[in-house]
């Protein structure tokens, strides 16, 4: 299991690290782990979340 910090996960997703910080507060984005005060993402969870973002149209709803 490969753990990623916020910056590494954001780079994979093509986002700014601050976006992931905001998403965590809003309950959005990939699943993350808290290890003490550290936030870590499992690489497989990041790719799984990304795979779940596939859409065939802009009007397609996100299913939880």
Image (cartoon, grey):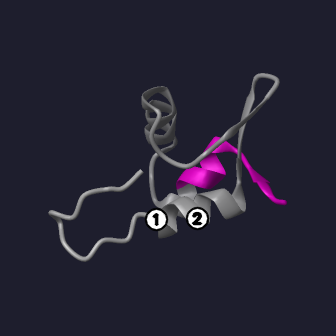
Please give the name of the residue rendered at 49% of the width and 64% of the height, measured from the top-left corner.
Answer: 50
On screen, 55 above or below 22?
below
On screen, 51 above or below 21?
below
Q: Nearer the viewer, residue 7 or 27?
A: 27
Q: Which mark is residue 10?
A: none
Q: Residue furthest front?
A: 64
* Cβ atoms at labels 1 and 2 below 8 Å apart: yes
Label 1: which residue?
A: 52
Q: Secondary structure at mark 2?
A: helix
Q: Would residue 21 appear left or right of 34 to someone viewing this image? A: left
Q: Secondary structure at mark 1?
A: loop
Residue 32 position by quadrant: top right
Q: Residue 14 location in percent, x, y?
A: 46, 60
Mark 1 neighbour class, 10 Å CA radius: few under 14, some 14 to 19, many 20 or more: few
Q: Would residue 39 appear left or right of 17 to someone viewing this image? A: right
Please give the name of the residue rendered at 15% of the width and 63% of the height, measured from the top-left corner.
Answer: 59
Q: Residue 64 location in percent, x, y?
A: 42, 50
Residue 58 position by quadrant: bottom left
Q: Is residue 27 magenta?
A: no
Give how far apart the Cα atoms at labels 1 and 2 are.
6 Å
Mark 2 neighbour class, 10 Å CA radius: few under 14, some 14 to 19, many 20 or more: few
In magenta, the rendered stretch is 1-10
On screen, 12 above or below 27?
below
Q: Residue furthest left?
A: 59
On screen, 28 above or below 53?
above
Label 2: which residue?
A: 48
Q: Is residue 6 magenta?
A: yes
Q: Nearer the viewer, residue 4 or 33?
A: 33
């Amino acid at each position: 299991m490969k753990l990623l910090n916020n910056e590494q996960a954001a780079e994979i997703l093509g986002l700014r690290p601050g976006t992931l910080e905001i998403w965590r507060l809003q309950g959005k984005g990939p699943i993350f782990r808290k290890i003490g005060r550290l936030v870590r993402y499992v690489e497989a969870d990041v790719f799984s979340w990304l795979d779940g973002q596939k859409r065939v149209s802009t009007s397609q709803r996100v299913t939880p």
